[in-house]
Amino acid sequence: MEEGSARRATLREIAAAAGVAVSTASRVLARSRQGLPPSSAAAERVLEIARQANYEPDAQAASLRSKQTHMLGVLVPHLTDVVLSTIYEGIDHAATELGYQTVVANTLDSPDEQRRRAELLLSRRVDGLILGDAHADSPFLAELTARGTPFVLVSRTHDGFDSVTADDYTGGRLVGTHLADLGHRRIGIIAGQPYASTGRERTRGCLDALAERGIDTPRDLVIHSNFDADGGRAATLRLMRKKRPPTAIFAVNDMTAIGVMGTLRDLECKIGTDVAVVGFNDISIARDLPVPLSTVRSALHQMGAEAARLLVARLRGETSDAPSQRRLPTELVVRESSDPTVRTRGKSGRILKKASPGHNGVPIQAPARRPTRRPAQ
Amino acid sequence: MEEGSARRATLREIAAAAGVAVSTASRVLARSRQGLPPSSAAAERVLEIARQANYEPDAQAASLRSKQTHMLGVLVPHLTDVVLSTIYEGIDHAATELGYQTVVANTLDSPDEQRRRAELLLSRRVDGLILGDAHADSPFLAELTARGTPFVLVSRTHDGFDSVTADDYTGGRLVGTHLADLGHRRIGIIAGQPYASTGRERTRGCLDALAERGIDTPRDLVIHSNFDADGGRAATLRLMRKKRPPTAIFAVNDMTAIGVMGTLRDLECKIGTDVAVVGFNDISIARDLPVPLSTVRSALHQMGAEAARLLVARLRGETSDAPSQRRLPTELVVRESSDPTVRTRGKSGRILKKASPGHNGVPIQAPARRPTRRPAQ
DNA sequence: TAGTTTCGCGGAAACGTTTCCGCGCTGCTC
DNA sequence: GAGCAGCGCGGAAACGTTTCCGCGAAACTA
């Protein structure tokens, strides 16, 4: 093969050069990594020599002995989904701060692939897992628990396990309230996949808020779909082809909402005037779209970071045993896709309605807005 | 700490149960992993016992001895950029097929962070690196070569090193030709960061194609920016505030183009009519936008996959020594943001112009399109 | 049948760390 | 000044695998 490959210095060499035993060198370097100062002349010598030799411990060897890899495995449905990649960036950011590295894998939301990739990560001996693709009905989480593998859910939750999510239910309520206040009485919901807690909770929140205002939503206006633009396209066609199509559509995901808008445009509906559209997550392009998208902002980066911190706390045994189900607050961002009277120029001029964070089941007091004319069908 | 943590079976235990030496067990399993059938009764016994015990070799221990981790490190500016995450999915897909795992890290396009993360990956003893964030002027690549670290560039190229990119120059030419054919004579280019070969090549291609048609683009119409929507916003404001603003804008990146469209909307310009907009990459939402975006399609997933395959080939010493600079063909996708007469409904109805792949410097023969009226102002 | 090659097996070393254990030294206390 | 606690050091084992080496049996050749 190649001749290059400048061999990295080994601990044995450092120790020999400093005239100490390798155990001593190991201890000195470990202490220095914890921020402690060298405690003897020999220790200083070791540090200096290591620095000069550009020594980096071999993580493989270290973790073979210590049984700790300082790696976290992350499973997500799709990194090309900006929601998940943002969460992952948050995970990686917090993990790095805590001295952990992350390894991520796509599972395409397939239970088989989820198992395969988890097994692969576990054979790398990751210290724990962060799962962004929890399925409502899968026995996988229970199996992991039985095996004693530490893990934390993110984005989607599941009873009985640690999780960090947005307050999806309350977020859904915000949307229901908003659309009702605008005068809508017939609202279609594109609810995502039934196995994802995100879509379920957001849908439930919206339906509850509507019901409290005397608006009953027939079953057939709630449609399941993929969490991408194509899912939004397909669902929109089904909704708009009904005898009495909705005057507003809530897509539980911004990408889906973009598909909705694209399809409405194709159908020559004016977005926001003929049909109101609201999404969820406030991904960065939402405000940059030719018709800016109303949506519910959720703290995706923070969500990932919190999940990583929770997992590391578990690994360190710093926490109580009860499952921690953290729900991050959300806020409604109104833009022209639901209310054309809101002119949002550049960065400013947005209207936010904050939810009272994490307080499920209590109606949000959103300031009543003037009911708009019922949109032409 | 915990009592759970069902210990995984070790090779020693498997060997003992089968009544063979661990070296034998190791060989048998290695052979079976290569698809070879067991060659003796003892071998069959080992395989059966391993299967029952759900045995998975400890990757740490294996690579400590064998000096091969079967891991590839991937560095990208930002995974939240769908261009990079798509490339990464391609990398991971091909790597998995070849029996490699990938570890990815964000570098935020910062040279310091690039170094830090590369070092971290290397201390995990990854077998090689795939770099998606090559900087034009950085000495980093030469250093890696000097150290004998195998690597391949993706998305951005650099003289003298392996790379897999889109044929950015020809892609840029397609845009220049398209806009000239539409009758535009004053075209703004939002060129991305000067250190990225992508933006540079695309810009150069566009300028060349225009120049060949007698259109000279003043320097001040070429503006550098970040590769995101905000970059597009800022650059558009600068362009449109000029005494003689352009009638068309080429953003070398779709996200940037979305920022352009958002800003044009704020300025009350009609996209495609007042000002034509063209992006680059054809990310999936381009066609779903309320005003569908004209853009140049590049094979991002394939690009990542090719990069992974090239790196693995290098690792296996299967290739010649000369640097391989692969350029994947691109094609123009015309939509309403540059040509409102193209009505693209749903999935169909798009017009594609293919580039002759990889043939730099030769004018593309695009069918001449009727010149449109010069846009207002 | 004897000699030679082939082949698979077992033993043991090796990979680069961390951690356990025992020992000697320092410094304190009485 | 003697005894004892504390501390840091060196030696060595351990982590779980792969790979080298030598040996014996089987298979083939002459």
Image: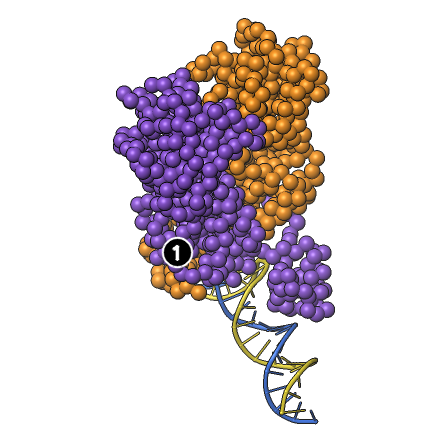
Chain colours: A orange, B purple, C blue, D yellow
For the N terminus of chain A, the image quarter is bottom left
Quadrant of the rendering where the C terminus of chain A is positioned: top right
Q: Position of residue C21 (x, y in %)?
A: 53, 60
The quarter holding residue D17 reads bottom right
Please report the residue visible at 59 percent of the width from the left and 8 percent of the height from the top. A374
Residue that numbered label 1 is attached to: B323
- In the image, A190 versus B306, the foreground residue is B306
Pointer 1: residues within 10 angstroms few (<14), some, or many (20+)? few
Residue C15 falls left or right of residue A163: left
Q: Nearer the viewer, residue A30 or B73?
A: B73
**A94 sits to left or right of A105:** left
Q: Quadrant of residue B77?
A: top left
The spot of residue B130 in percent (x, y) is 44, 49
Q: Badge 1 sits on which subunit?
A: B
Q: Which residue does the image show at 63% across and 28% down from the upper left?
A: A234
Residue D25 lies, in percent from the top left, at 69, 81
Task: Give the structural element (helix, strand or loop) at label 1.
Answer: loop
Residue in view at x 36 percent, y 45 percent: B362
